[in-house]
Amino acid sequence: MNILLSIFFFFFLFSCSGEDSNSPQSQNYREMMRDFVKQISNYTKTKKQDFIIITQNGIELLIENSTDQNITRYDYLDAVDGISQEGLFYGYEEFNQETQEEITTYLLSILIQAKRNNKPVLITDYCKDVDKINLSYQKNKRFGFISFQADSLELDQIPKYPEKPWEENYDNIQNLSDGKNYLYLLNFRKFSSKEDLIDKLNSTNYDILIIDAFWREFEMFSKEDIQNLKTKQNGGKRLVIAYLSIGEAENYRYYWKDEWNYQLPDWIKDYQEWEGNFPVEFWNGTWQEIIYDYLDKIVTAGFDGVFLDKVDIFEFFEGNYSL
């Protein structure tokens, strides 16, 4: 998984901002990703009407283009239930470092539009110093964002600080907008067993859990496991959301074929920003079939929604490949 937005792509957007509003090629990749997310939303909500769709990064999809941010893509906004962004205030370029002011300003200009359209905004800042964690929370609260301060880039632990989740509460969380806090945990290597992980999660009062759908590479959480996780320690109900990358194929997933280790299919690109993660032509039919199968597993397991990562992969194709 690509945890932080690539700084290269940020400056690519700004250097080409006059181009992306007029270039059919540039616009095409964005439109195809919007269409894919909308299709995913329709597909899952047909199976479970209140299924939650959250997209991480790629927030430019909310607007028509980077030069005129006043044109909101309401068709895309209608398809999602929440927007997530990494590194808004800390960790965009480097872990535990404040994000450059111009980057924060740019991201806020779009995120505020989502908030104004009643879409919850989830922010993951990457910082470990107590003063930075406190400042991140305060800054995010000022804008009405729900925030999580990850003290590890690997997202492999429940933070020790704060000792309790921000704005801990006894409320039953029925939808995303009810949430006051969340935990983002993808790598379970520090937990001795699935039971150990579930016990530790159940001893917390986070309103929302965003976790990988699989405990191990080929072992998915059961419906009983997920149901067990839906109750906070204090008895309140919470949401459990499954992570899913729709822009990169991961060679540690159940769908990865052995022959791909020797010869990648044309729709998987031989480039790794993070080891084992390969950009895919997300519009490819084979890839989309894989994603729909993955979504079926997530819905069947009883997750409340899905956290779609790598929707920003359209930027990779704008900069490196043509149709």
Image (tube, helix red, strand yellow):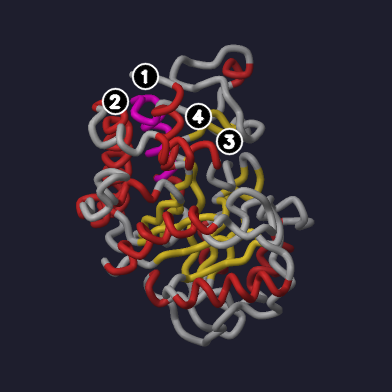
Classify the position of the N terminus by image quarter: top right
Say if residue 127 shows up in the picture: yes
Judged from the image, the secondary structure of the residue bearing numbered disc 2 is helix
Between the residue at mark 1 and the residue at mark 2, the CA separation in whole angstroms equals 7 Å
Residue at 55% across / 41% down in the picture? 6
Where on the picture, by quarter, is residue 285?
Answer: top left
Judged from the image, the secondary structure of the residue bearing numbered disc 3 is loop
Where on the picture, by quarter, is residue 7?
Answer: top right
Disc 4 target residue: 279
| Front: mark 4 or 1 | 1
Where on the picture, by quarter, is residue 28?
Answer: top left
Question: Which amino acid lies under the numbered mark 1 shown in the image of this protein?
Answer: Ser
- Which secondary structure is most common in the magenta stretch? helix
Judged from the image, the secondary structure of the residue bearing numbered disc 4 is strand
Say whether residue 168 is left or right of residue 56.
right
Question: Which amino acid lies under the numbered mark 4 shown in the image of this protein?
Answer: Pro
Residue 92 lies, in percent from the top left, at 58, 52
Residue at 51% across / 21% down in the picture? 269
Q: Which mark is residue 253?
A: 3
**Does label 1 or label 3 sit earlier along the sequence?**
3
Residue 293 lies, in percent from the top left, at 41, 38
Q: Is residue 285 magenta?
A: yes
- What stretch of residues is rendered in magenta? 282-295
